[in-house]
Amino acid sequence: MNIIDARKLVHEYFRRDEEGNVEGVSVALDGVDLKVKAGQFISVLGHNGSGKSTLAKHINALLTPSDGTIYVDGKNTAEPENTYDIRQTAGMVFQNPDNQIIASIVEEDVGFGPENMGVPTDEIWERVENALKSVQMWKYRTHSPNRLSGGQKQRVAIAGVMAMQPKCIILDEPTAMLDPDGRKEVIRVAHELNQKKNITVILITHYMEEVVDSDYVYVMDKGKIVMEGVPRDIFSRVDELKSHRMDVPQITLLAHELKRSGVPVPEGILHRKELINVLNS
Amino acid sequence: MSLIVDKVSYKYSTGTAYEVTALDEVSLEIKDGEFIGIIGHTGSGKSTLVQHLNGILKATSGTVYYNGQDIYDKDYDLKDLRTRVGMVFQYPEHQLFETTVFEDVEFGPKNQGLDEKEVAERAYDALQRVGFPEEYYDQSPFDLSGGQKRRAAIAGVLAMKPSVLILDEPTAGLDPKGRNEILDMIRSMHEKSHITIILVSHSMEDVANYVDRIIVMNDAKVFLDGTPKEVFAHSKDLEAIGLAVPEVTYLMLELKEMGWDVDTTVTTVEEARKEILRAYEVKKSASK
């Protein structure tokens, strides 16, 4: 069964002038079809304003469709009585770690979610421990979040979602405000959760290097899904990606340019090792 | 005419158990018209360093000279320094506040006490220089895309006609196209008006493609200082402090180890293409 099943999803919103009068209608999502199987690691790519974050907000019912439907674990997000279940199924991590950490001690912040769900105290602590250990932040449990680096804060935010034991985690540009080290940490943790705990991960990003190890990639532009496929397939379409304001990793681009210059190199090279092997053969 | 940082140390929370040395006897000279990248990971002291260049932070010891004058002299005009050494902070679009883009850009020169005509001219000129589309001059800055907002914010600093422009992570949070557009814009600005540009970044790839000189900060000190090629030749040292050289540089290093006759100082995709192509032709004709 698909844990996420979006069918012709449309999201429209009204543009308003200073007095609040409606100026016009903008379409942020325009007939999006998206199917995610439980346990997959999916990436959604797109430039700023392509609609990818709007899509993310539909997956845990922060927004509901203007048209079309989206089912999360079999539940229609348009039905208000499903909202609570859906948010428990699909946890969300946002771009700015400072906007989602609320407590003054790391472990209390992670415990906030399960506490609100009415989980018994003993179990809360068990969940907090598991969650912090799975993002490798257990030794910081008594620290104040404001003393942590961006990558560490983001991992605490992920632990906070983990503690609610969702089946699916949506990471909405979780690395946009981090430095290269922090970015690597967060992506590594996301892959680990996917592999070890079998949590479905939906990674929304505009960094191409982060999606090379995904099971499947969607590229969005102007509210539509314009490309989809496995990473190798997506990255072999360099010119098409560029037309959607995307970039490809340096190595992929180099392989593409070498091919153009007459060196027999296949398209869609993702890693340095592959290119070296091809050149040596 | 230059900026000289002379043995500058900066400490905070001094006298407490949390004392931190953010800069440790840093000395360097920045000459007129240079295009410099300052790299280092979070907490290396790079932002602290640039905040000394226009007197936002005052060194705990050591001093900064601008055009030969000590900026910590009692009668030194710091306000004037700040218009000459312009600073674009991280996420500068958070500082936009006026009702139109044009008025927002006018704010800086207006505060310099210039007359209305001059202010408008400056604003117009600055917006032209950042390549901001004229039809949006009267738009609210809040209705713009991320990349456009950032251009508007940079124009706001340029309108004060600084001779040195410092940009702290100017591409953070932008998509790849937006990132290239902003960096191209900064480069063409440097080429046309020859102002000194200091780009603070943690992206090696970005910096390698654009700047003439790289200063690598680590642990409150200058770790490396030189042209991109000189700096990236220290790939092992850079890795040891948690920084990486561009992917293509790694590729060349690995090819070299396998016996390819390639130049390992390559830092851009285009250079790598040419090098591999050259070595490939040599290899092919040798095997015939």
Image (tube, coloured by chain):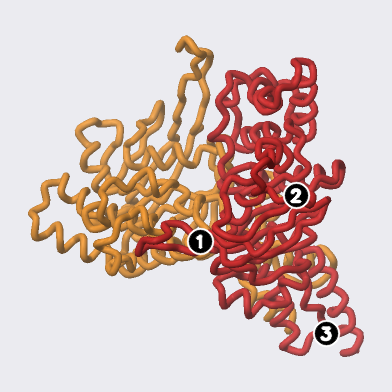
- Residue B69 is tagged as 2
Determine the residue positioned at 80% across, 28% down.
B125
B172 vs A174, left or right, is right
Work out whether mark 1 precedes mark 2 in sequence or the reverse, and give the earlier one: 1
- In whole angstroms, how far apart are the C-alphas of marks 1 and 2? 29 Å
Chain given the colour red:
B
The residue tagged with tag 3: helix, strand or loop? loop
- Residue A54 is tagged as none
Foreground pick, B193 / A135: B193
Foreground pick, B238 / B248: B238
Amino acid carrying mark 3 in the image: Asp
Same chain under badges 3 and 1? The reply is yes
Q: How far across and how far down the image is residue B118, in percent? A: 79, 20
Amino acid carrying mark 2 in the image: Gln
Disc 3 marks which residue? B261
Q: Nearer the viewer, mark 2 or mark 3?
A: 2
User: Which quarter of the image is occupied by the C terminus of chain B?
Assistant: bottom right
Amino acid carrying mark 1 in the image: Gly
Work out whether mark 3 precedes mark 1 in sequence or the reverse, and give the earlier one: 1
The picture's colour for chain A is orange
Q: Nearer the viewer, mark 3 or mark 1?
A: 1
The crowd level at tag 2 (other Cα within 10 Å; few <14, some 14-19, many 20+) is few
- In whole angstroms, how far apart are the C-alphas of marks 2 and 3? 50 Å
